[in-house]
Amino acid sequence: MIARTYNKGLLVVISGPSGTGKGTVCKRLLEKHPEIKLSISVTTRQPRKGEVEGKNYFFRTEQEFKQIMEEGGFLECAQVYDSYYGTPKKYVREQMNAGHDVILEIDIQGALKVKERFEEGVFIFILPPSMEELRKRITGRGTESEEAILKRFQSAYQELDFMNRYNYVVVNDEVEAAADRIAAIIQAEKCRVDRNHHINEQLLGGVI
Amino acid sequence: MIARTYNKGLLVVISGPSGTGKGTVCKRLLEKHPEIKLSISVTTRQPRKGEVEGKNYFFRTEQEFKQIMEEGGFLECAQVYDSYYGTPKKYVREQMNAGHDVILEIDIQGALKVKERFEEGVFIFILPPSMEELRKRITGRGTESEEAILKRFQSAYQELDFMNRYNYVVVNDEVEAAADRIAAIIQAEKCRVDRNHHINEQLLGGVI
């Protein structure tokens, strides 16, 4: 019998303060590793033009959403204005069992909820290379008022403290390097002894 | 101020049952990553032809060796026949401080001693892809008696249990892939939050 280290997928939660560029890093990671899947949320809001069921979102009625919630089917869920959003366990599990890593890009509050329900996930905190750079990135969006920018910056500031609840920290100094670090983390996590207690049995099963 | 994740070197202890090919994997890893250094042992035995002080070994008298030992200067040491061998903390620390990862390829007994004295090391257990393959590799050396081979195989068998004392397990199915997994583990370890508690201060130091 051939011994193999953990060969299912992992749930990789990528999170961090607003403005650290985690979206761009995730996009680059998925481009480089097409076998990695992005988590797909369930939402009660109406599909926008071009959005595809099962690709951008799983669109459900409020009643359907609440039923999934009652059945404990979400890793996390939240209400934003009049709509609900949630990360369905089922989709994540299916992808993982098929050997695909699943990336969940999510804010810190959401990530901490996921951690309560899915301890075996890999929790990665994305940091900006400096607070000056973060300020530039937030300001650079050019879509928000002075006040909104200041608020966003202050909240990013406070959010740094949550790093200690994560497993890894990746500084987004260059998108390419940051994406490569995440890929290395995924590869390394599959070699962790904690995820490979089966392997001795596999090896010994072959000779007993 | 620019935030950087852990940028010193790591001590990477590579170990596992006899016959798993850990030497070949380490050699490939060092070829691919010349910035990684191999740990150099102190020994009391005479230099063989071609062996260079400070490259192959640090050659010391028995008295000098014992003094290092008394000063707690070894990560581990052992007597083999009439000679002593030890892994000097000083060299490892110097290389690490200069930013070089240090590979220590060592048997299981030695690795466990290092773990007691250097918890922050990264402990990697190399496994053969199968016990049949391990038997082939041990037999294939062709330098040992039937009895010696059997003994080696049985001891490899028992040594599998020690995997749980390590952080990572790497199956040496292909040398190239195994070396790449170790490189990924090293990269990932430097991103562990546990090794990066300084980074928030670094970031905040830049704006306060």
Image (cartoon, coloured by chain):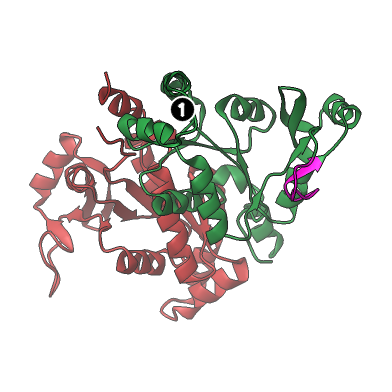
Chain colours: A green, B red
Residue at the (76%, 23%) spot, across then down:
A82
Tell me the residue at 27%/22% (across/down): B207
Residue B24, position in %: x, y? 39, 69
Q: Which residues are magenta?
A: A47-58
Residue A105 relative to residue B122: left or right: right
Q: Residues within 10 Å of mark 1 (few under 14, many from 20)?
A: many
Q: Is residue A78 above or below residue A19?
A: above
Which of these two is toward me, A187 or B144?
A187
Q: Which residue is mark 1?
A: A163
Q: Amino acid at mark 1?
A: Met
The majority secondary structure of the magenta stretch comes to loop
Any part of residue A138 in sight = yes
* Rendering coords of residue B171 (x, y %): 54, 61
Residue B180 position within the rendered picture, expressed as x and y whole percent measured from the top left: 44, 62
Chain at tag 1: A
- Quadrant showing the C terminus of chain A: bottom right
Of residue B205 and residue A61, the one placed in the foreground of this image is: A61
Count of numbered circles on the image: 1
Q: Is residue B95 magenta?
A: no
In this rendering, position of residue A125 left or right of residue B68? right
Q: Residue at x 65, y 25 (%)?
A: A113
Res B157 quadrant in image: bottom right
Q: Quadrant of residue B128?
A: bottom right
Q: Quadrant of the N terminus of chain A?
A: bottom right
Residue A31 or residue A36, whichever sits in front: A31
Residue at point 12%, 66% (across, down): B47
Q: Secondary structure at mark 1?
A: helix
Task: Say if residue B15 shows up in the picture.
Answer: no
Residue A181 point in image, percent of width and height: 44, 50
